[in-house]
Amino acid sequence: MHKMQNLFIALLVSFSGVVPLHAAGSFDVYLGASRDGPGGVQMYGYFKNGVWHDYKPKPGHTVASVNDFRIHEGKIYALVAIWDKAQNYQYGYWEDQVWHVLPAPPGHKITRIHKINFNGSDLYVTGRVNKNNQEITGYWKNGSWNVVPAPYPNTSFDDIFFDQADVILTAVHYDEKTGMLVPHYRKNGKWQDVQIPPNKRLSIKQSHWFRGDIYQAGEIRSPHDLNDRKAAYWKNGVLQWQGTQYTEVTSFVVDDGGIYIGGWDSNYHPGYWKDGQWVALPILGHNGVSSANSMYKIGGTLFVGGFNAGRDSTTTYPGYWTNKKWTLLKHPKNNDNMRVLFVGAVKRP
């Protein structure tokens, strides 16, 4: 792997172009993030309008991972796996600062949780459970487990979307013959393949459902050379566009204003492609890799969440870009190895 890629979460930038928090205007802006805590343990939480809120599990419990964030009706939801005192996993989600346990079906054990989404007031979570050493795929709807048979063995579901009564799912399965992850999607109850160019493999990073179509963005990669990659996106499983060599995808938005693909150009500069045209984002100017690894569009405003590395590449500066201007956020204790995982916004009344 390219040594710069190993710095994926060590960011960028000098303080020219930094703007104050009021740059968000009439929006409440959320950034889900993590940072290095005592002993190297990852600490998770979120900024709301620049104010940090810790996720605090019960004493003796540790947040193992935050798998997904979602904004819904003015609240931020985080899908989380937690280590308990006995070193067992607990699964659930935070609704702002309120913890909810995700129940396992009777006689089953949860083994994976992937993405969270809403259909009206109904909350959905994709994942897998295990019974008698058999992996079972499906989703929770308001805490009730629903089985959806997987198209292949070794399948994991990812995103979930809704079109009237139809539940749309994206998934990958591990092909033991090739050793590669193969992407699929389910629409109108039927599983469909995502087009893979000959002698290549795909890395799907994010999916969107928009006006009856499924859009997916990621990279076309060589199965033999990790540095051989091109940013790309697909519509209903068919390849629509690919970037130049050594480009990479970190985020994705589709709406009436166009198709926005956040990522890196071939020089590891952060930015996004709008309808295939590269838009570079300003960085602070220090040596280090910057990242535009989350995007959120509301109305005509595009928020791009990311972080910048200090001169020593150990202190990172979390924040977001709006209209190509950088807004810096600061953790009340320290910003060491701060990673922005999600950006979202809610228009104020």
Image (tube, rainbow, N blue to C red):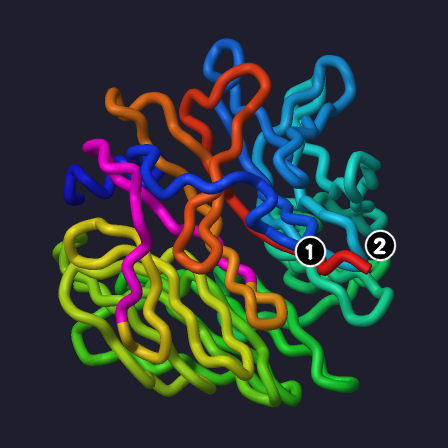
The magenta stretch is: 278-296
Amino acid type, mark 1: Ser
Looking at the image, can residue 223 be seen?
no
**First reached walking from the N terminus: tag 1 or tag 2:** 1
Residue at coordinates 71% horizontally, 14% vertically from top-left? Answer: 60
Could you say whether the residue bearing mark 1 is in a helix, strand or loop?
loop
Residue at coordinates 48% horizontally, 55% vertically from top-left? Answer: 322
Q: Which mark is residue 143?
A: 2
Q: Is residue 288 magenta?
A: yes
Residue at coordinates 32% horizontally, 54% vertically from top-left? Answer: 281
**Discs 1/2, front:** 1
Q: Name the residue under label 1.
A: 26
Q: Does the magenta stretch include residue 247?
A: no
Q: Is residue 9 above or below residue 119?
A: above
Query: Who is closer to the viewer here, 328 or 195?
Result: 328
Could you say whether the residue bearing mark 2 is in a helix, strand or loop?
loop
Mark 2 neighbour density, 10 Å: few (under 14) some (14–19) many (20 or more): some
Query: Who is closer to the viewer here, 262 or 347?
Result: 347
**Labels 1 and 2 touching (C-beta < 8 A):** no
Quadrant in the rendering for residue 8? top left
Residue at coordinates 57% horizontally, 41% vertically from top-left? Answer: 21
Quadrant in the rendering for residue 224? bottom left
Mark 1 vs mark 2, CA separation in Å: 34 Å
Question: Seen from this angle, which residue lies furthest top?
Answer: 39
Looking at the image, can residue 142 be seen?
yes
Q: Is residue 10 above or below residue 291?
A: above
Amino acid type, mark 2: Gly
Percent coordinates x, y for residue 24 in the rendering: 59, 51
